[in-house]
Image: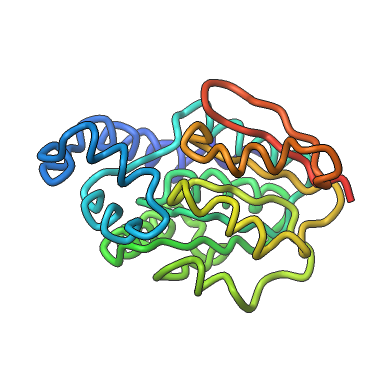
Amino acid sequence: MNTLANSPLAPLLDRLFAEADTATSPAMAALSREERNRLMHSRTEYLHLYGLLKDLWLPVSRETGALLYMLARSIGARDIVEFGTSFGISTLHLAAALRDNGGGRLISCEFEPSKVARARAHLAEGGLADLVEIRAGDALETLRSDLPDRIDLLLLDGAKPLYRDILGMVEDRLRPGALIIADNVDFCPDYQAHVRAPGSGYMSVPFAEDIELSMRTG
């Protein structure tokens, strides 16, 4: 079974990737490179930044989407947490893996209300809405409660300075062998240093261009 390769999901993803390729953000374009870089690294202005990014898709690549699906399938994931829904492209890949694993629950979170609405519509169109709960708001609040006892996979693809905080919030629920995929990890060196540190409880390697792939060891 490969839900990714069949209708309704395959044509939906083709359309969404095409839309993402042409999306622009006038608000972000108006910022200088220095200001964009400052906001990307700020631990206090991330809500402002993602408000500016509300028109941008910020999707994973096709290759990363396929990787997410394969990793979730290979470990038989049933409980997944995603930090950063955006318009739901990565969410669709992970939910497809849950469907092909026989079911499960994906908890995703997104700051921007307009993106939450669009992502929910995409999940319904792809026939995967029953597997996904999208929590609207700041993940530092929305992920504080009602999480699975054992998390199989964690995707970090939201505000980069918060990766270490989000990991800390769910860490005690990650089962041994759980996988953590962090996208754009070059913006969060403190997270990367943590998962690579001896005795951290993780094995971790750089993967592809800017992905950190980690496994919970204990």
Q: Where, by quadrant of the figure, is residue 105 drawn?
A: bottom right
* Front residue (pair 32, 47): 32
In the shown orientation, is residue 1 left or right of residue 187?
right
In the shown orientation, is residue 93 left or right of residue 36?
right
Q: Where, by quadrant of the figure, is residue 14 drawn?
A: top left
Q: Position of residue 84 (x, y in %)?
A: 45, 53
In the shown orientation, is residue 50 left or right of residue 210?
left
Quarter occupied by the N terminus: top right
Q: Position of residue 4 (x, y in %)?
A: 54, 38
Q: Position of residue 162 (x, y in %)?
A: 50, 54
Name the residue furthest right.
218
Q: Position of residue 92 (x, y in %)?
A: 49, 48
Q: Which residue is drawn at 86% across and 51% down?
A: 176
In the image, residue 177 sits, relative to residue 118, either above or below, namely above
In the image, residue 91 sits, relative to residue 105, either above or below, namely above
Q: Residue at x 30, y 54 (%)?
A: 50
Q: Residue at x 53, y 35 (%)?
A: 185
Q: Residue at x 33, y 40 (%)?
A: 16
In the shown orientation, is residue 32 left or right of residue 49?
left
In the image, residue 183 sits, relative to residue 91, either above or below, namely above
Q: Where, by quadrant of the figure, is residue 78 drawn?
A: bottom right
Name the residue furthest top.
209
